[in-house]
């Protein structure tokens, strides 16, 4: 049986599935229920000075019949006292000593204040500390959260303060609301961070009420920018995780739109050791971890991996600069006429939105004794197909349109190689250079 446990900065966790800091990890009651369900760890809802939250807190983006593909929140850190939260962390660790409990911390930017909260969190028995440098709303207006995470010097300085007294590993939670998140990861490591977690939520307004003109969610007719998360942010989060993994040698806890085992594996392949889940737990409850565990176990066994740790960073070498991609690689669309339902979506998408490489033929079908019954059949003009994938992406029938590789007989030629070849052979045409000519 594959080993699902992970080693994160020397801390052993039963599996890589952690609750992210947020509403599902707000109390000992919730965290204990999560551990009973199978979660390997939990990042406690961020602890700081007592906060008063608004009554309207969440807004969402829906897509057709899919609810909450994106969730916006204007909720702040824990509105319960530091003492209560730390006492409950101690209770959880006493009952679940083998599970990973991470204390998420956020206080004002004073050295003594950080020293105090770190010592108290460690005394509660927390296995790791996560410094919340990412909250984009409410706290950033107070000089905390993203206000720290967006300034490399501040991130380095506060991390150094924490490391002056911390005995347990320190994770810095990075905000995605920056130009280059890898640059912020470098700043965190410079300050002594043992690991980073990313991404925190994206600054957002998910919509405006067309009747009262208030941004959603509205508080007495007014709204504010909030933090955006959920399935919709996963592609950007994956990019940012891979960017950090390729830039900084530091353990990563991946966050952003993870809702099933496949999402989790993708994050791990791109460099995450653990994965944190919040929106999906809010949407479907703690029991989703059962499918995550079963799915990961089956995947490891099918692929011949002995441990979940074997996945970490496996895909990172395959993430490359565009300038290194092979310009002579060619694929074309293949349409299975038997599976085709004649919806013409591929034709419309290609004709109006892409490269005009599909035509539609009308062919007779069925019993012709009672009149001609014509069926629309899309045909790919292979010599003109650029292999953009759009037709396959819009097709509603699984495997009706596939992309087939075509052997061009040409050598690997990247844009960087092409520029070098042009410098050596300035009189050659682009076509000659792509063909490998001198």
Image (cartoon, rainbow, N blue to C red):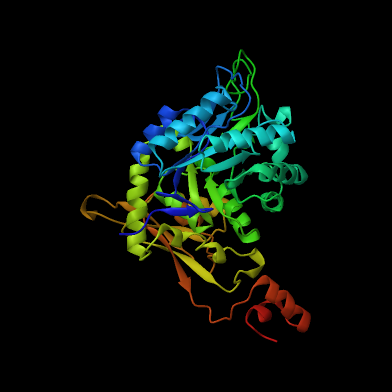
Count the marks: how many?
Answer: 0
**Image quadrant where residue 319 sits:** bottom right
Q: Quadrant of the C terminus?
A: bottom right
Q: Residue at x 26, y 50 (%)?
A: 371
Residue 365 appears in the rendering = yes
Q: Residue at x 68, y 76 (%)?
A: 417
Percent x, y of residue 182: 67, 53
Decide which of 57, 134 is in the foreground and name it: 134
Percent x, y of residue 300: 36, 60
Q: Is residue 266 left or right of residue 184?
A: left
Decide which of 127, 377 is in the foreground and name it: 127
Percent x, y of residue 181: 67, 49
Q: Is residue 249 left or right of residue 270?
A: right
Residue 25 appears in the rendering = no
- Is 150 drawn above or below residue 1 in the view shown? above
Percent x, y of residue 97: 41, 41
- Is 315 drawn above or below residue 426 in the view shown? above
Q: Extreme bottom residue here?
A: 438
């Amino acid at each position: 049986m594959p080993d699902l446990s992970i080693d994160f900065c020397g801390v052993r966790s039963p599996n890589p599935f952690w609750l992210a800091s947020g509403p599902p990890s707000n109390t000992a009651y919730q965290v204990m229920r999560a551990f009973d369900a199978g979660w390997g760890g939990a990042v406690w809802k961020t602890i700081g000075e007592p906060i008063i939250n608004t009554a309207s807190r969440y807004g969402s983006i829906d897509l057709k019949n899919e609810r909450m593909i994106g969730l916006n929140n204007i909720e702040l850190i824990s509105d319960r006292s530091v003492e209560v939260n730390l006492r409950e962390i101690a209770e959880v660790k006493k009952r679940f000593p083998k599970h990973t409990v991470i204390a998420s911390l956020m206080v004002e930017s004073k050295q003594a204040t950080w020293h105090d909260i770190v010592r108290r969190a460690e005394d509660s028995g927390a296995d790791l500390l996560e410094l919340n440098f990412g909250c984009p709303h409410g706290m950033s207006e107070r000089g905390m959260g993203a206000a720290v995470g967006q300034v490399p010097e501040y991130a380095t300085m506060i991390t150094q303060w924490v490391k002056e007294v911390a005995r347990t590993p320190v994770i810095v939670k990075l905000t995605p609301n920056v130009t280059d998140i890898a640059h912020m990861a470098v700043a965190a490591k410079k300050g002594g961070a043992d690991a980073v977690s990313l991404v925190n939520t994206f600054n957002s307004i998910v919509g405006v009420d067309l009747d009262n003109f208030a941004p959603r969610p509205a508080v007495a007719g007014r709204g504010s920018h909030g933090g955006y998360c959920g399935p919709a942010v996963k592609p950007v989060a994956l990019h940012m995780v891979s960017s950090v993994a390729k830039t900084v040698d530091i353990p990563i806890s991946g966050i952003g739109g993870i809702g099933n085992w496949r999402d989790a594996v993708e994050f791990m392949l791109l460099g995450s050791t653990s994965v944190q889940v919040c929106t999906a737990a809010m949407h479907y409850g703690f029991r989703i971890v059962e499918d995550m565990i079963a799915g990961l176990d089956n995947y490891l066994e099918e692929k011949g991996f002995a441990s979940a740790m074997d996945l970490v960073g496996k895909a990172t070498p395959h993430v490359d600069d565009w300038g290194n991609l092979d310009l002579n690689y060619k694929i074309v669309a293949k349409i299975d006429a038997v599976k085709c339902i004649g919806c013409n979506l591929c034709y419309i998408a290609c004709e109006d939105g892409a490269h005009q490489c599909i035509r539609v033929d009308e062919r007779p079908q069925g019993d012709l004794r009672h009149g001609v019954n014509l069926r629309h059949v899309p045909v790919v003009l292979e010599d003109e197909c650029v292999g953009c994938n759009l037709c396959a992406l819009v097709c509603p029938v699984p495997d009706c349109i596939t992309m087939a590789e075509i052997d061009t007989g040409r050598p690997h030629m990247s844009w960087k190689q092409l520029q070098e070849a042009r410098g050596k052979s300035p009189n050659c045409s682009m076509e000659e250079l792509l063909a490998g000519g001198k």
